[in-house]
Amino acid sequence: MTEASTRLSRLFEGHRLTPTQRRIAQCMVRRADDAPFLSSVELAELAGVSQPSVTRFAVALGFDGYPALRRRLRESLRDGGVGPGGARSSANVYQRAVLAEIDQLRRLAAELGDPARVEEAGRLLAASRPLPVLGLRAAAAEAHGFAYFAAKVHPGVLLLDEGGSVLIDRIEAAAGDGATALLCFALPRHPREVADALAVARGAGLRVVIVADSTVAPVARPGDLVLSAGVSTALSFDTACAPALLGRAVLEAMCDALPDAQARLERFDTRAAERGLFLE
């Protein structure tokens, strides 16, 4: 990566951009030497987006419009901008995405130096019968993965990965059946129906545990137990290795709080061997 590409990459870091806006950013990084001289129409054509998308992109970066962004790029070019960034300066877009994830995982490791909140979450979830696990849209994969493994040790896991009015019915039914807690995976861009579903859960008396990208996630409310791990925005779509790993840590804490977890796992392994479920 050239020094000009590195300067552009740093300009975009730390901003919450939509997938379309990230495509524009990546196009500019690839054409870093030309970027300060491109019109909004030319940039839109190169990125395969509309001209208004380029304007919204500039505004999302904190500029009044695209002309202001282009002036900043030209000033940076004239002044020499920011110097090379070590290993990142020579990395391609895919390597930078990996390095960004490593940064998020390091932060998570530091946060887990005090495991008290994760352990509290594990106890709350272990005690809930049934245990609703909610995750919609971008967070559906994390919810599905947690529910898949949790069902091997918890007797009443209820996966909630589809929205709509039926979602509210299922949360209310879970509360009526004795659930005391709900686990929610909440990732950007936070769907409004997640906030609505959590409001129903709280109203039904459930303790809400949230694995989110931030402790101030828009779906969280006072009284929730929020555990956070950042997502990376280096690619067009968020990568969420750290939240996924945090979910596994919560799962481990839940296993520790379930007295019969090991016995259940052993029974599953025995039946899996008898049925020849796995190749190894």
Image (cartoon, rainbow, N blue to C red):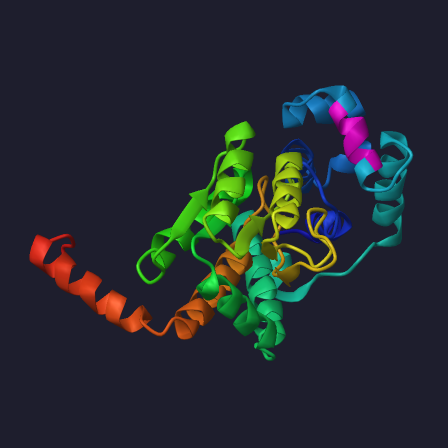
Residue at image coords 59%, 53%: 206
Direction from residue 152 to residue 237 in the image, left or right: right
Residue 92 in view, yes or no: no
- 221 relative position to 163: left or right: right
User: Which residue is the extreme one toward the bottom?
Assistant: 113
* Residue in view at x 69 percent, y 39 percent: 25
Report x, y in % for residue 184: 55, 51
User: Which stretch did the figure color magenta?
Assistant: 53-59
State the image coordinates of residue 223 (x, y, percent, origin top left).
70, 60
- What residue is at 34 percent from the left and 55 percent from the top? 151
- Is 58 contained in the magenta span? yes
Q: Which residue is drawn at 15% across and 57% down?
A: 272
- Horizontally, residue 149 falls left or right of residue 173, namely left
The residue nearer to you, when weighing 213 against 29, is 213
On screen, residue 91 above or below 53: below
Q: Quadrant of the C terminus?
A: bottom left
- Quarter of the view holding residue 104: bottom right
Residue 35 quadrant? top right
Residue 224 appears anywhere in the view: yes
Q: Is the magenta stretch mostly helix, strand or loop?
A: helix
Q: Does the magenta stretch include residue 123?
A: no
x, y percent for residue 212: 61, 54
258 or 75: nearer the viewer: 258
Count of numbered tags: 0
Q: In which quarter of the image is residue 26?
A: top right
Residue 207 place in picture, x, y as percent:
60, 57
Frontmost residue, 158 versus 64 = 158
